[in-house]
Amino acid sequence: MEHVTEDHRALSAAVLVSLGTAGVFEALTLLATQDKTVRAASPWGDDPYDVVVSLTQFTVPMLALVIVLRMLAWRAPGGTDRARQTVRAVAAMVTLVGLTVVSEWAAVIAGVPAPVPGAWTSVLIGGLVAHSILTAVSAVLLVQWRRRQGPSGRWRYDWLDDALFVCRRIPVLRRWAGPDTAVWVRRHAMAVFVTLSTLAAAAVTGAQAVGEGWTDPLLIAWFLIVAATSDLAFCLISNAVAGFIARPPRTRPRRIAEVSVVAGCVAISAATAFRDALWPVFGAGPLTSVPAVASLTLGAGLATSVVTATLLRACFPRDPSR
């Protein structure tokens, strides 16, 4: 009993500190990206550093939100699975924060000049120091908790069970929270992820187009695709890590297709971040036109998907027993 209490305290400390780290990170990131004066003084306001920040400023709060909502069902059945899955989700969130911290420090160390250096530049670097320390503390707490646990077995519960548990206690949602809903979502998880990614990307694209005064349909369409593919990669990878939706077994061709899609989505984001460095390999002159940017980034994603699928089919010719 005492051991269980100590584990619970260690878990609570790791989760709460990590959520606090995410909160500080999000506040500083929004300040650096949404305020034009502050953004002009940011050392990491340009690509490739800005691509990482643009991704994590939305994915980190999304993970934080689902972690907080899961606390509402903490006493539901499946406590052991819940603890392990929650720690995995928290670790994914802290990892995203850590990747952003590394990207921002890379900009500082590389001596990337801010467009308008000034007092805000020092404030941003001071904030970077603060959430670097918080990220390190969160990581240590998560590692300490993980070392106290034994090997994990096969999960019997997922986050969808908890979501339905909460919905059944809300009169308006009760009729939609039956077993058939869970079965449908698990069978159509990919469609759910694609839909959520597209809706989130549409909202971000609309806000970006209005804020920047975009009128070029091709630019808007390209940005929508980049945002949707990065969101889809985030959904599939985080689901594999934290077990949000326990998906039924899938055929080998479908698994290969999904891995290839994820690889292509990641390649699109990477090509977007490093487009200026990649363009001289394929073209001449500066990369200034939207068609050229779209061809480079989306072409990189398509090529990566095809190569990934080809390699997986060649290296794993038989369907492994499940």
Image (cartoon, rainbow, N blue to C red):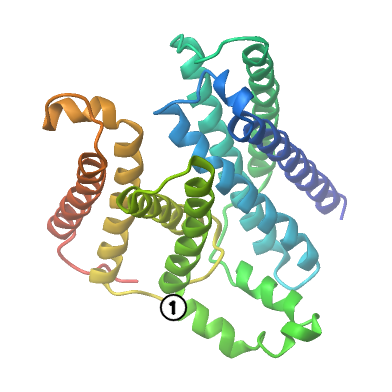
Asked if residue 273 can be seen in this view, the reply is yes
Comparing 285 with 320, the one in front is: 285
| Residue 262 image offset from top left, x and y in percent | 34, 54
Classify 164 as above or below 277. below
Quadrant in which the C terminus is drawn: bottom left
Asked if residue 157 can be seen in this view, the reply is no
Q: Residue at x 78, y 43 (%)?
A: 16
Residue 316 left/right relative to 50: left
The residue indicated by pointer 1 is: 188
Q: How many marks?
A: 1
In which image quadrant can residue 69 be found?
A: bottom right
Q: Residues within 10 Å of mark 1 (few under 14, many from 20)?
A: few
Q: Residue at x 83, y 46 (%)?
A: 9
Comparing 118 with 28, the one in front is: 118
| Residue 85 image offset from top left, x and y in percent | 62, 57
Q: Residue at x 47, y 56 (%)?
A: 201
Q: Amino acid at mark 1?
A: His
Classify 319 as above or below 4. below
Classify 162 as above or below 153. below
The secondary element bearing badge 1 is classed as: loop
Q: Residue at x 44, y 78 (%)?
A: 188
Residue 307 left/right relative to 260: left
Quadrant in which the N terminus is drawn: bottom right
| Residue 124 image offset from top left, x and y in percent | 64, 19
